[in-house]
């Protein structure tokens, strides 16, 4: 595989730079006698399938030496690489391995000064997933600068949904959308206006799909109007992302649209609306989900069953109990039966005992189970108070340490943080997340999820009475229309 072929010392240093330390590749001060043309040739026309293991190791050493030669030469090497790009395009030739590897070399030579060229290469007819172990670390290194000059590179990455990045230190294989989430999380809240502009200016489906999903996760209200339009009038991946995004925003004005979408004759489309309904957290939707348990589409049935387990209304539990014997697939019957059994155990009841109770009593018994997860966000009697001033100090420490665990404020839990925060602090939390995500590991992801939960609740508190699972999503007050989205600059949209 190409990723194995090119796991050389230079690439190893690059990965370390992008994922942990801020270390540049150390190259000799002088590349005396370096043959730049020969270095370019060594990087061209590399096809991993054509190499034996022995040849692969030899080629890796040759490419390693070529990279060092070019990096040491600096600007002249950068100009030679760009000239080679032009030759490839003029000849209508395909050499994606070269373009991806040479992009890394360009960055090592010129950093952000070479961002326009790298963005142009990545935006063109190049398969980024061919060697995503080049693309992802480089995108992370660009994102962590939080410099507007890096934005075209980050936007160019959004066209790809196939690339995967494997980090050996944590044995974690990152796939889309996590790859894109890490990159845009690292750039921080300053990237949100550019993404919102892409909803209208971009014609690329995956780009608009991710933009909608990420804006919702960051509770960026200025993007809501454009997302609603795509959800109603758009097509394909962009519409899928927009529908899901409306569920995450959870705005009172979108309930009727999301419920109506469950009636779609296309099970793939109905699935997207069921996904959104789960995120939206309005218990009224359970009645609209139950009929979909009879769908011929297994993926849709599974999503609906998960929604009903989460909602835990009396009608949902009864539907799951019926499904535990009537489902078309054995694994679905077993899954429904286990879910019901867990809830009955929590209530210390048998099914017959539960079924004999009036609806009001069933509701009283189920409510504590349904709201168990929300308990982590409510302050407890005798809790230590985190002031807003302390929150600001804590945020600076968390950003410096790249983690929200340990340190002076180790005692701070979700509930303390939420009580000390206001919607005006959403950007602050996104800035903390921008530092936490640089660890790119399975251990940082739970911390990112904690921040996501806080941002969701802070964002929703601006327009709905109950920010989590509730009987009915209702507005705090008359909701103002979402601000219009400004189109991005040419540099942002490129």
Image (cartoon, rainbow, N blue to C red):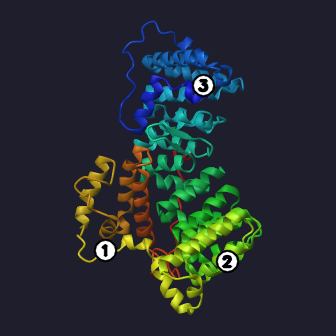
Q: Are the residues flagged by discs 2 and 3 in contact, CB closer than 8 Å?
A: no
Residue 421 coordinates in the image, percent (x, y): 32, 67
Cα–Cα gap, marks 2 and 1 = 35 Å
Marks 1 and 3, the one that precedes in the sequence: 3
Q: Is residue 332 left or right of residue 438?
A: right
Res 89 seen here: yes
Q: Which residue is mark 2?
A: 290
Q: Is residue 60 left or right of residue 451?
A: right
| Quarter-of-image position of residue 405 | bottom left
Callout 1: 10 Å neighbours few (<14), some, many (20+)?
Answer: some
Taking depth in this image into account, of 201 and 263 the one nearest to the observer is 263
Marks 2 and 3, the one that precedes in the sequence: 3
Please name the residue shown 49% across and 25% down the image.
105
Please tell me whether mark 1 sits on a helix, a strand or a loop. loop
Disc number placed over residue 440 in the picture, else none? none
**Count of numbered marks:** 3
Disc number placed over residue 98 in the picture, else none? 3
Please name the residue shown 47% across and 9% down the image.
34
Residue 407 coordinates in the image, percent (x, y): 24, 52
Quadrant (top left, top right, bottom left, bottom right) of the N terminus: top right
Please tell me whether mark 3 sits on a helix, a strand or a loop. helix
Please name the residue shown 55% across and 76% down the image.
311
Please tell me whether mark 2 sits on a helix, a strand or a loop. helix
The image shows residue 57, relative to residue 438, as above or below, that is: above
Quadrant (top left, top right, bottom left, bottom right) of the C terminus: top right
Taking depth in this image into account, of 342 and 142 the one nearest to the observer is 342
Q: Which residue is mark 1?
A: 379
Residue 23 coordinates in the image, percent (x, y): 36, 31
The image shows residue 352, relative to residue 139, as above or below, that is: below
Callout 3: 10 Å neighbours few (<14), some, many (20+)?
Answer: some
Callout 2: 10 Å neighbours few (<14), some, many (20+)?
Answer: many
Marks 2 and 1, the one that precedes in the sequence: 2
């Amino acid at each position: 595989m190409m990723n194995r072929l090119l796991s050389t010392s230079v690439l190893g240093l690059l990965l370390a730079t992008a994922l942990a330390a801020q270390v540049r590749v150390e190259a000799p001060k002088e590349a005396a006698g370096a043959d730049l043309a020969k270095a370019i040739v060594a990087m061209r026309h590399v096809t991993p399938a054509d190499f034996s293991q022995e040849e692969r190791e030899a080629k890796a050493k040759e490419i390693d030496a070529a990279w060092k030669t070019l990096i040491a030469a600096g600007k002249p090497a950068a100009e030679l690489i760009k000239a080679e790009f032009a030759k490839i395009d003029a000849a209508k030739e395909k050499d994606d391995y070269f373009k991806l590897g040479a992009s890394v070399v360009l960055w090592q030579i010129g950093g952000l000064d070479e961002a326009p060229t790298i963005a142009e290469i990545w935006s063109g007819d190049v398969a980024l997933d061919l060697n995503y172990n080049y693309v992802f670390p480089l995108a992370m290194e660009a994102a962590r600068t939080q410099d507007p000059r890096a934005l075209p590179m980050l936007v160019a990455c959004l066209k790809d949904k196939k690339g995967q990045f494997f980090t050996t230190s944590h044995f974690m294989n990152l796939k889309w959308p996590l790859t894109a989430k890490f990159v845009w999380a690292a750039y921080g809240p300053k990237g949100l206006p550019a993404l919102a502009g892409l909803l209208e200016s971009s014609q690329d489906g995956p780009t608009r799909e991710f933009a909608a999903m990420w804006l919702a996760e960051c509770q960026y209200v200025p993007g809501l109007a454009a997302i609603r339009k795509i959800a109603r009038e758009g097509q394909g991946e962009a519409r899928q992302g927009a529908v899901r995004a409306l569920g995450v925003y959870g705005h009172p004005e979108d309930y009727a649209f999301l419920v109506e979408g469950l009636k779609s004759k296309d099970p793939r489309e109905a699935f997207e609306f069921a996904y959104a309904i789960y995120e939206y957290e309005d218990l009224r939707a359970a009645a609209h989900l139950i009929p979909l348990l009879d769908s011929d589409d297994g993926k849709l049935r599974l999503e609906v069953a998960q929604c009903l387990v989460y909602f835990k209304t009396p009608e949902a539990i009864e539907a799951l109990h019926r499904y535990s014997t009537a489902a078309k697939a054995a694994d679905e019957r077993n899954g429904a039966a286990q879910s019901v059994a867990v809830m009955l155990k929590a209530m210390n009841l048998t099914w017959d005992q539960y079924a004999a109770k009036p609806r009001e009593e069933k509701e009283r018994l189920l409510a504590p189970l349904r709201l168990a997860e929300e308990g982590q966000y409510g302050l407890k009697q005798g809790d230590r108070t985190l002031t807003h001033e302390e929150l600001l100090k804590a945020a600076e420490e968390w950003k410096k340490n790249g983690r929200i665990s340990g340190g002076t404020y180790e005692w701070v839990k979700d509930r303390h943080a939420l009580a000390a925060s206001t919607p005006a602090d959403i950007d602050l939390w996104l800035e903390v997340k921008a530092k936490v995500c640089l660890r790119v590991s399975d251990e940082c992801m739970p911390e990112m999820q904690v921040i996501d939960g806080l941002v969701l609740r802070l964002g929703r508190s601006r327009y709905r009475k109950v920010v989590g699972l509730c009987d009915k999503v209702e507005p705090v007050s008359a909701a103002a229309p979402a601000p219009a989205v400004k189109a991005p600059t040419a540099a942002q949209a490129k």
